[in-house]
Every structure is written in structure tokens, then in C-alpha cells.
Image (cartoon, rainbow, N blue to C red):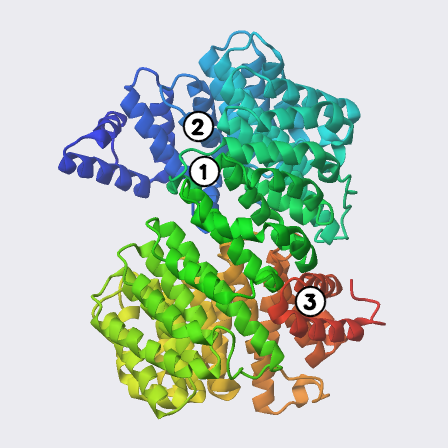
């Protein structure tokens, strides 16, 4: 279908029609034109956008159509769109860019579509090292020069200058900063000129400030010289004092980002400029300015915490910590305390505690300071707390409680005991504060933390404490009743833990709360029946915690409570919040019951109730998670009774148009529990998952869960039974590898799952060094396996080379390190090097995995054993990079 320009303009104008039929017809025509000849369509949209004689509606619609042809949120698709742009003739691309430049400042909308599209085309021109040519980088330089001349020149209108700065801003967001650093002067010169010139119009100053904010990562050469640093710091610090509130806020954002990127260069500016500017910002009456002042110190504290804990990669230059936060504590803590006091509204308005405000920012900052300055923070906080906790103003009492909450975890039990023992009576008294619901809530939060972190402060007289907590479950503010639920659960868990330690790991016969146990569970059950879902959730969470923390003399209460919960679940209407919370409590607490005939029956009843909900069409995460727990609780033998229903449901669920990732996860759970008894279902579900993985534009989470379930299948049935599926699984992994994006948060899980699946496939195909003979001498069975092993290792080697570097997430690095370690253990260093030499530095990966595994206790031991053994194997193998 070839549509004339006039026809296209008419369709664009109809995209805002209130008549749905006209709107649909217009959109259909536009979509057909784009599909038929996307290059011509892009060119036509740029013509419409650039012509100021066209109506504002048509131009805006053309800009949106153009933008949608150039970029998309999906990262994999975005690259496809960029390659499509590069496939257009160079002459066409230049003509489109010239039209976009001519459109700057002529639109009636913000943000400028022309500015955004210029950035998208600039990013596409520099898609990858394969597509980069000298003409690509030259075109980027030409674009930046044109934008700079528009901004600095005298002929362009204010609107044009603003739009050019917008374009600069978007270019900095879209284009790789390492590429842009070659043009940093073309970016900085126009931006700084606009910010330094006091006569510049407000709108231009704001656009310039935004462009500077976006450009900070790519202008690092400017920070390498003292003169360059001085200019930027002077301009930024001056702009923070602007009378234009928006400019001041953006300038503080710049200061925060400078701290993140250029911490090592701040020393000469802190005392004279940055410290007084940021402290004054915190006490500003403008909440946005105050938040940015707080954010600066939170960022600095986080940086210095990371420097102290050694999380930075030592293979790179790591800046020396200047301990700015430690030096600032005497001035910073009192100002943050005042922020906790000042930024509070009504004493009983609990909802505003959910909003991000200077109050929450100050609390967060104090938490960072406590982590960063563990040994000294209480020296400045506790005097403030002592002065405020008995104050007549509820705001002061509230601030004191949250200050304690911010630092208590970092103080250590001995210091907590010494500092808070004199205040315990006052903190408990504040749980009954009649003047402020916020104070009552804050005191419960602190009491819960005290129970967890310093059990020695739990009063010896438990009856008043228990009675008080039970009474607070009836507070007319549901948030406080929910906090009391959590306090009660914390108390029971801690007392149970102490009793468990005394029995050296054996379940205690009794504990000091046994006499109150029945009353507590009954009260929590009643709380779970309240209409407020927030309170229901807290009550059922607390109930599950308490049922799991039960000595032997409370076992009958645990069992009867679980039976009550099961009856509730069977009688509750579908789609209620209480149904979800009851499922969650049951899935956790059923594990507490000893395995006898009655308990097995309870587990069967639980699974039957869940299946009823699933078959009734209930689609809720809580139900799926509870089903996962029920599958594990029943085990392979007892699960057989429910297999026909489960298999029927799964087959129906995976056949729906929008398959839920949790369904795929449940199939993996089923295979994992059944083990080799899952063989009758392997072919059907393996094929189903393959069909899903071959769908175009598959959701990243669904793709990740499909990969994980393939791993569960392979592990469950074993290498012999999975052998017929290995070749196609390897090809599928190669296909997925081409769609994942390096160092992208959304793709970390799928990359980790892929590496784990590769590890399983390698173990099933490995013909290791024990054979000690060349391939030609191998028996046919081993020869076939050997070829699969080669394909597996070549594929995973390329995959790891594509996704792994120093910025890769910890879990991907650890999974990669374990895989390489296992390969070295099976094949030896020499053969492993043959497969990985061109793509990967095995020694670097193993060392990095070792270092990062220290922060992940659940697999730290496995990773350390495998990687250390592999590194020992590499010792003396001098050829490894």
C-alpha cells in the first residue's frame, strides 16, 4: 500500500479522533505503510515533522511515529531497530537528520520529538564495533558541532537553543559515554556557556543544566585537569544557589552525580564549598532541595562504605577514602535530626510515612552513616536521642525513635545494651503514646529491632510485655496493629532461638512463652479476619513465624491452628486477600509438623484446596508459590495422588496465549520433586517449553524461567535419559544467547540460568581426561558425546566472552566461575584452555568469582572449593592469559 504524503498527513491528524472507528482506520493505514516500506515511512514522517506549515497535531503525531520506528524499550528489539536504520542508504539518513535539525525549536510540545529522534539516530550510527566506521564517528561529531553552533550562535531563537540542548541531553543518554568522551569539548562548551551567562533565559539554563547532568559520565577528560575541574565545580556550585528552584534542584543532582563519578577529585572543594552548600540545602524549606542535600551525603557514605568493605575490583584503580562522612558527622547529624523533626505533618497521619520525603531521606542517610561510621555514629546520635525522646513535642519523640532505628543494627549488641538500657522504659511507654499514632508505630518498630538484635534487653517480667503487645493488636490504626504483630513475632522467635541454643539444636521441650502461646495464636487468628489487608498480611506472617518457633509442649496448639487455617482456606471465597495470606501461612507452617498419617492428610488437603483454586481460574502469585511449597512438602510418593490434576492443569495453562512465568516454574518444581519418575512427562513439557522459547519477542522473565525449568528437567531425569534432547537444547541456548544483552539488569537472571544449564549439559556430554585417548580411537558412544561436548564448550565459551566483563553481575560471574572450574576439573587446564583461550581469561574469572562469592553465603562454599581447585590446576600453566 503506497500512501501519498497528503494521505499520511490526514491519517496523522486523525490519530486524536474521538471516533474509535476513524482512529483505528488511521492507525491501520500508518502501520501498513511502515510495514510495507519502513525507510520511506521514516523519511515521510521526518518531512511532516520538519514542515512548520503542517498542523501541530500532524507534526506531533509524525514525531511519535518516527520515534517508534527508531527505538523501542525492549533491549533486543532496540538493537534490531538500530540495524534497520543503518540499512537505509547513507543519503537518506543524512536527509532525515537534516530535517530533524531544521525542526528543532519549531515544535509546540515538550519534550521535543526532533531532539529525541536525533539522539536515537546518533546511537544507531554507533551500534557496535562491527558497524562503527570513521564515517559513523564523523557523523556524530558533525551532529554535535551543529548542535553546539545552534546553542552558541546569535541567530537561533530561544526555542531552537533549548531544543538543541535537549538533543544534546538525549545524545548523552543514548550514546556510549566512552565514544562521547572523544567529543567532550563539543558538549561542554555550549552547556557551560549557557549556565555561566546570567543573561541566559531561564528555559535555556534549565535545558543546559539537564544536559550537563546527562553528560557527566562522558566528560571525564575534563576532570583529569585541575583547571577543567575548577570550571565545572564553580559553575555547578553557583547554580545550586540559583533563585530558580528547578535550576537549583538540577544543580544539586549534578553535585550528587559528580560525587558518584569523581569522588577522588572532591578533596579540594569539600570544606570551602560542597560541605556548607549541601548542609544548607538539607535545612531548605523546599523539599526537593532538601532531598538533594541529603542524597549527596547518602551517596558519599555509600561510596566510602564500599571502599572500606573492598567491593571495588582491585584490578582497577580504586580511589583512596577521604572519610568525608566521618569528618562531617558533628555538623551533619544535628542537621539530619532537624530534618527528621521538621518534615512531619499530622501526628496521626500514617499514610505520609509511605511518601519519599526529606524525613525518609534523612532516616536513610543516617542508616548509611551508621554503616559507614560504625564506631563513632552513636557518639553523635545518642545525645540527640536522649534530648528528644522525652520532649513534649511529638515530632521530637518521633525523630528520636527513628534515629535509634537507623543506627541500632550497626552498634553491636553490647553497645545497644549499654546505650538503650536507660531508655527501655521510655521506649515501651511510647507504645501507648495517646498524642501521636506515628510515635506508637515508631516505638513498636524499635522494640522489634531491640528484641532481634539485643535479647538481653527483653524484660524479665514477660506478662506485662505480652499483655501490652496483645492489647496493641487492637489499636485503631491498622499500621500500629500490624507493627505490634511483627513485634510479637520477633519476641517469640528470639525467645525460641535462645531455648534452641540451650538445647544445642534440639527442639526445646518448653520455653518461657509456652503459657501465652495459645492466647497469642488465637489473637493473631482474629487479627487475620480483620477487613484491612495490611493487617491481615502482618497477622498471618506473624502467625507463621510463631508456629515455626514452637517448643514441643506447644505442638498440639500448632497442629490445631494449622487445621483451623486449612478450614479457613477451604471456606474462603476466591480472589480475597485473606485467601492469599492463609496460603502463605500454611505453606510455611506445615513444614513444622512431624510426619505422621494425620499430617500427611493435612498436606493432601492443602494441595486439594490449592488445586481447586487453580482450576477455578484463580491467577495469583501467592497461590502459585503455595502450590510450589505443597509439591515439595508432599514429596514424590504422596504427590502421585495429585499428579493427574496437576498435569491436566499445567497442560491447559501452558496452552494459553499469555503463559505465566510462575507456571513454568511450577513445572520445574514438579520435575525436581519427582526425579526420574517425571520421565513420562518429559517429552511433552520439553517440547512445550521449546515452542515457547521459539516465540518472537518472548518476555525476558518467561525466557529465564523456561531455561531454569529445562535445567530442572535435565537434572531430574539424568544424563542417560536427557541425552536425546541435548543437541537441540544446545542450539536453543545459542539462539537465546544472541538475544541477551551484556550488563543489562533485566537479563542477569537468564544469563545465570543459561550458565547453570550449560554446566549440566557439559557434565552429561563430557568425555574427560580419564579416557586419555584421541577422538578417533573413541567408541561410537563416546565419539558422539565428545562432539556434543565440543559444541557445548565452544558455545558457552563464546557466550561468556560476549557477556562477561568487570561490570557483570555477581551471580553471573559466580555461575561462570563454577562452570569453568568444573570444566578444568574434568578436562584439565590444557584442554580447557583450548576451548576458552580466544574468548575468556579463565584465571581472572575464577579469581573474580572467588572474591564475589564471599557476599553470597548460600553458594560461597561450593564456589570457593571449585574455583580454588581450578586455580591450583592453573598454577604452572603459564600460557593461560
Horizontal and vertical percent position of residue 764: 56, 82
Residue identified by numbered label 3: 836
Horizontal and vertical percent position of residue 769: 71, 84
Residue identified by numbered label 2: 96
Q: Is residue 446 above or below residue 831?
A: above
Q: Nearer the viewer, mark 2 or mark 3?
A: 3
Label 1 crowding class (10 Å Cα cut-off): few <14, some 14-19, many 20+?
A: some
Q: Is residue 234 above or below residue 44?
A: above
Cα–Cα gap, marks 2 and 1: 11 Å
Q: Earlier in the sequence, mark 2 or mark 3?
A: 2
Residue identified by numbered label 1: 88
Instruction: Check disc 1 and report its element: helix, strand or loop.
Output: loop
Direction from residue 404 to residue 868 in the image, left or right: right
Q: Earlier in the sequence, mark 2 or mark 1?
A: 1
Residue 348 or residue 650, whichever sits in front: 348
In contact (CB < 8 Å): disc 3 and disc 1: no
Instruction: Check disc 3 and report its element: helix, strand or loop.
Output: helix
Residue for point 62% across, 34% down: 296
In contact (CB < 8 Å): disc 2 and disc 1: yes
Q: Which quarter of the rendering shows the C terminus?
A: bottom right
Cα–Cα gap, marks 2 and 3: 44 Å
Which image quadrant for residue 875? bottom right
Q: Nearer the viewer, mark 3 or mark 1?
A: 3
Residue 107 or residue 812, whichever sits in front: 812
Q: Earlier in the sequence, mark 3 or mark 1?
A: 1
Q: Nearer the viewer, mark 2 or mark 1?
A: 2
Residue 664 appearing in the image: no
Residue for point 50% across, 41% down: 398
Residue 429 or residue 446, whichever sits in front: 429
Horizontal and vertical percent position of residue 602: 32, 83
Amino acid at each position: 500500500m503506497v500512501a501519498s504524503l497528503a494521505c499520511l498527513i490526514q491519517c496523522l491528524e486523525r490519530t486524536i479522533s474521538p471516533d474509535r472507528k476513524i482512529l483505528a482506520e488511521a492507525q491501520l493505514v500508518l502501520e501498513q505503510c511502515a510495514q510495507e516500506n519502513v525507510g520511506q515511512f521514516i523519511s515521510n514522517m521526518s518531512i511532516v515533522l520538519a514542515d512548520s506549515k503542517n498542523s501541530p497535531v500532524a507534526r506531533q503525531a509524525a514525531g511519535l511515529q518516527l520515534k517508534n520506528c527508531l527505538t523501542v524499550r525492549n533491549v533486543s528489539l532496540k538493537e534490531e531497530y538500530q540495524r534497520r536504520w543503518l540499512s537505509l542508504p547513507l543519503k537518506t539518513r543524512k536527509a532525515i537528520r537534516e530535517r530533524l535539525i531544521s525542526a528543532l525549536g519549531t515544535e509546540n510540545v515538550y519534550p521535543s520529538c526532533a531532539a529525541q529522534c536525533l539522539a536515537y539516530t546518533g546511537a544507531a550510527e554507533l551500534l557496535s564495533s562491527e558497524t562503527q566506521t570513521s564515517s559513523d564517528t564523523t557523523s556524530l561529531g558533525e551532529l554535535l558541532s551543529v548542535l553546539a553552533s545552534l546553542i552558541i550562535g546569535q541567530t537561533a531563537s530561544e526555542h531552537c537553543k533549548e531544543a538543541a540542548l535537549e538533543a544534546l541531553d538525549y545524545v548523552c543518554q543514548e550514546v556510549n559515554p566512552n565514544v562521547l568522551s572523544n567529543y567532550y569539548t563539543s558538549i561542554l562548551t555550549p552547556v557551560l556557556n549557557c549556565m555561566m551567562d546570567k543573561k541566559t533565559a531561564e528555559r535555556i539554563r534549565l535545558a543546559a543544566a539537564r544536559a550537563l547532568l546527562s553528560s557527566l559520565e562522558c566528560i571525564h577528560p575534563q576532570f583529569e585537569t585541575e583547571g577543567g575541574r575548577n570550571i565545572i565545580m564553580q559553575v555547578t556550585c553557583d547554580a545550586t544557589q540559583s533563585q530558580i528552584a528547578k535550576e537549583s534542584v538540577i544543580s544539586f543532582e549534578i553535585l550528587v552525580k559528580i560525587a558518584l563519578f569523581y569522588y577522588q577529585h572532591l578533596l579540594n572543594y569539600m570544606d570551602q564549598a560542597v560541605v556548607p552548600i549541601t548542609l544548607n540545602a538539607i535545612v531548605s524549606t523546599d523539599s526537593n532541595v532538601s532531598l538533594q542535600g541529603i542524597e549527596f551525603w547518602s551517596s558519599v557514605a555509600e561510596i566510602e562504605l564500599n571502599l572500606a568493605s573492598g567491593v571495588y575490583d582491585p584490578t582497577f584503580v580504586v580511589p583512596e577514602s577521604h572519610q568525608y562522612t566521618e569528618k562531617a558527622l558533628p555538623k551533619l547529624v544535628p542537621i539530619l535530626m532537624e530534618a527528621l523533626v521538621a518534615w512531619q505533618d499530622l501526628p496521626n497521619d500514617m499514610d505520609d510515612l509511605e511518601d519519599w520525603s526529606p524525613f525518609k531521606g534523612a532516616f536513610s542517610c543516617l542508616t548509611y552513616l551508621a554503616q559507614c561510621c560504625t564506631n563513632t555514629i552513636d557518639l553523635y546520635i545518642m545525645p540527640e536521642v536522649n534530648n528528644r525522646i522525652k520532649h513534649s513535642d511529638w515530632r521530637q519523640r518521633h525523630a528520636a525513635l527513628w534515629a535509634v532505628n537507623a543506627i541500632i543494627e550497626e552498634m553491636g549488641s553490647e553497645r545497644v545494651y549499654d546505650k538503650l538500657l536507660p531508655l527501655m522504659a521510655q521506649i515501651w511507654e511510647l507504645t501507648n503514646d495517646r498524642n501521636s499514632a506515628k510515635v506508637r508505630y515508631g516505638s513498636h518498630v524499635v522494640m522489634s529491632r531491640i528484641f532481634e538484635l539485643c535479647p538481653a534487653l527483653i524484660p524479665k517480667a514477660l506478662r506485662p510485655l505480652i499483655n501490652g503487645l496483645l492489647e496493641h493488636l487492637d489499636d485503631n490504626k491498622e499500621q500500629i496493629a500490624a507493627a505490634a504483630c511483627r513485634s510479637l513475632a520477633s519476641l517469640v522467635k528470639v525467645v525460641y532461638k535462645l531455648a534452641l541454643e540451650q538445647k544445642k539444636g534440639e527442639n526445646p521441650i518448653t520455653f518461657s512463652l509456652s503459657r501465652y502461646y495459645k492466647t497469642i495464636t488465637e489473637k493473631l487468628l482474629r487479627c487475620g479476619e480483620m477487613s484491612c489487608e495490611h493487617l491481615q498480611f502482618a497477622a498471618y506472617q506473624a502467625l507463621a513465624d510463631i508456629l515455626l518457633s514452637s517448643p514441643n509442649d506447644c505442638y498440639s496448639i500448632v497442629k490445631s491452628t494449622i487445621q483451623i487455617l486449612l478450614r479457613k482456606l477451604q471456606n474462603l471465597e476466591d480472589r480475597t486477600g485473606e485467601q492469599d495470606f492463609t496460603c502463605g501461612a500454611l505453606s510455611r507452617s506445615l513444614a513444622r509438623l512431624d510426619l505422621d498419617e494425620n499430617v500427611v492428610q493435612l498436606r493432601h488437603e492443602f494441595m486439594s484446596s490449592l488445586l481447586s483454586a487453580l482450576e477455578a481460574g484463580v491467577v495469583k502469585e501467592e497461590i502459585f508459590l503455595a502450590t510450589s511449597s505443597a509439591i515439595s512438602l508432599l514429596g514424590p510418593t504422596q504427590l502421585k495422588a495429585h499428579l493427574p490434576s496437576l498435569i491436566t492443569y499445567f497442560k491447559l495453562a501452558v496452552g494459553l496465549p499469555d503463559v505465566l512465568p510462575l507456571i513454568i516454574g511450577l513445572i520445574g518444581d514438579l520435575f525436581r520433586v519427582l526425579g526420574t519418575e517425571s520421565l513420562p512427562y518429559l517429552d511433552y513439557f520439553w517440547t512445550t517449553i521449546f515452542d515457547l522459547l521459539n516465540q518472537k519477542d518472548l518476555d525476558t522473565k518467561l525466557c529465564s524461567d523456561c531455561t531454569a525449568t529445562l535445567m530442572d528437567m535435565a537434572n531430574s531425569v539424568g544424563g542417560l535419559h536427557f541425552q536425546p534432547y541435548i543437541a537441540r537444547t544446545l542450539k536453543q541456548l545459542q539462539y537465546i544467547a544472541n538475544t541477551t544483552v551484556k550488563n543489562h539488569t533485566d537479563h542477569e537472571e537468564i544469563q545465570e540460568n543459561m550458565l547453570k544449564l550449560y554446566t549440566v549439559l557439559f557434565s552429561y556430554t563430557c568425555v574427560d581426561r580419564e579416557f586419555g585417548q584421541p577422538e578417533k580411537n573413541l567408541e561410537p558412544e563416546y565419539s558422539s558425546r565428545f562432539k556434543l561436548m565440543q559444541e557445548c564448550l565452544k558455545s558457552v565459551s563464546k557466550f561468556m566472552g560476549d557477556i562477561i566483563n568487570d561490570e557483570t553481575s555477581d551471580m553471573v560471574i559466580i555461575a561462570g566461575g563454577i562452570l569453568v572450574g568444573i570444566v578444568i576439573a574434568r578436562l584439565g587446564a590444557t584442554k580447557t584452555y583450548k576451548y576458552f583461550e580466544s574468548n575468556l581469561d579463565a584465571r581472572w574469572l575464577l579469581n573474580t568469582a572467588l572474591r564475589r562469592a564471599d557476599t553470597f553465603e548460600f553458594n560461597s562454599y561450593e564456589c570457593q572449593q571449585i574455583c580454588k581447585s581450578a586455580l591450583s590446576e592453573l598454577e604452572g600453566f603459564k600460557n593461560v592469559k
